Image (cartoon, rainbow, N blue to C red):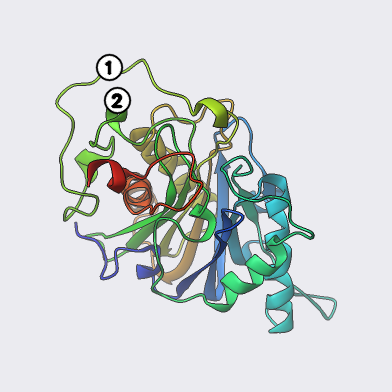
Amino acid sequence: MKPGSLNLITDVEGLLVGNAEDHGIKTGTTVLTGEQPFTAAVHVMGGAPGTRETDLLAPDRMVQQVHALVLSGGSALGLASASGVADALRAQGKGLDVAGQIVPIVPAAIVFDLVNGGDKNWPESPYPALGRNALSVAARDFGLGTVGAGTGATTAGFKGGLGSASLVLPSGHTVGALVVVNALGRATVDGGPHFWAAPFELEAEFGGLGPASAYDPLPFATKHQLRNAATTIAIVATDAALDQAQATRVATAAHDGMARALVPSHTPADGDLVFAAATGARPVNDPVGDVLTIGHAAALCLSRAIARGVYSATSAPGDPFPTWKDTFG
């Protein structure tokens, strides 16, 4: 298996991603939207999630498709970014027609980045505007690292960031992942240069160092003064024609990729969450085998995306932690 042409979640045809950030505040928003509404699902594993409109993503709910998914900084305050996205989509005439009224369906999740060194004394919430701005620049190609919702992200010892990766499967299906890495745990082994996700790396996408030769599996460094600044949130996507129940299973399987790339993950202080998106462009021939493979591929993509997010981070004044590249070159 190989990555798609961009090695981004937007290798899934029809999906677009936009980023908007404020480097003074050290925060931002990332929006995934589609040329058409798409099936979406969610699975939460962390102990401290912050979400909007995730209840309607259960397979037994009336609404089966959404118009955008939003990942944002700002903790609960950042959920307002989804309102900015919904307002912009409504102005474009995009949304669910409810008795003649256009209602965009925009689920969202947030990370806690309020104690990362940025100026949080804003006179009014920046998040609705960040949401609108991110939607306005949504495209197939987009940046990684210290951009969008990854702008203020941190991990134990290094800056976090926005990551993405993709795979093209032998079946012809494309799978991708998009992630904001803001974890209580580490993406690297014992604080060294080797990523936990190294066994799954393709084409030296995060340095090509290979796996660490030895490690102590129990100790890990917390983020000290940022102990409560946690949560890794992600979207995995495919062009397969999945229903909401199948997409939920893919989101659940994708959490394996988070656990392989962040040690520890899914802690009581993390709000770890995975959305799944399915555009339906390519049929599923084997409802069991194809969904199994897509879920496994989503986990692989998510592991790689997490490492790419940390690897791609860039330094800025006032950062509480160094970047991986500043430390290891």
**In the foreground, 245 or 152:** 152
Disc 1/disc 2 C-alpha distance (Å): 7 Å
Amino acid at the residue labelled 2: Asp
Q: Which residue is mark 1?
A: 216
Q: Which mark is residue 122?
A: none
Work out whether residue 258 can be spotted.
Answer: yes
Residue 193, percent across and down? Answer: 24, 37
Classify residue 55 as left or right of residue 268.
Answer: right
Q: Secondary structure at mark 1?
A: loop
Q: Is residue 224 above or below residue 176?
A: above
**In the foreground, 160 or 264:** 160
Give yes or no for contact between labels 1 and 2 (Cβ–Cβ under 8 Å).
yes
Residue 222, percent across and down? Answer: 47, 25
Quadrant where the N terminus is found in the figure: bottom left
**In the foreground, 283 or 228:** 228
Q: Which residue is mark 2?
A: 190
Closer to us: mark 1 or mark 2?
2
Residue 233, percent across and down? Answer: 52, 46
Q: Is residue 49 above or below residue 7?
A: above
Q: Residue furthest front?
A: 317
| Circle 1 Cα neighbour tier, 10 Å, few/some/many (<14 / 14–19 / ≥20) | few
Q: Residue at x 38, y 28 (%)?
A: 263
Q: Secondary structure at mark 2?
A: helix
Work out whether residue 297 can be spotted.
Answer: no
Amino acid at the residue labelled 1: Asp
Residue 72, percent across and down? Answer: 60, 54
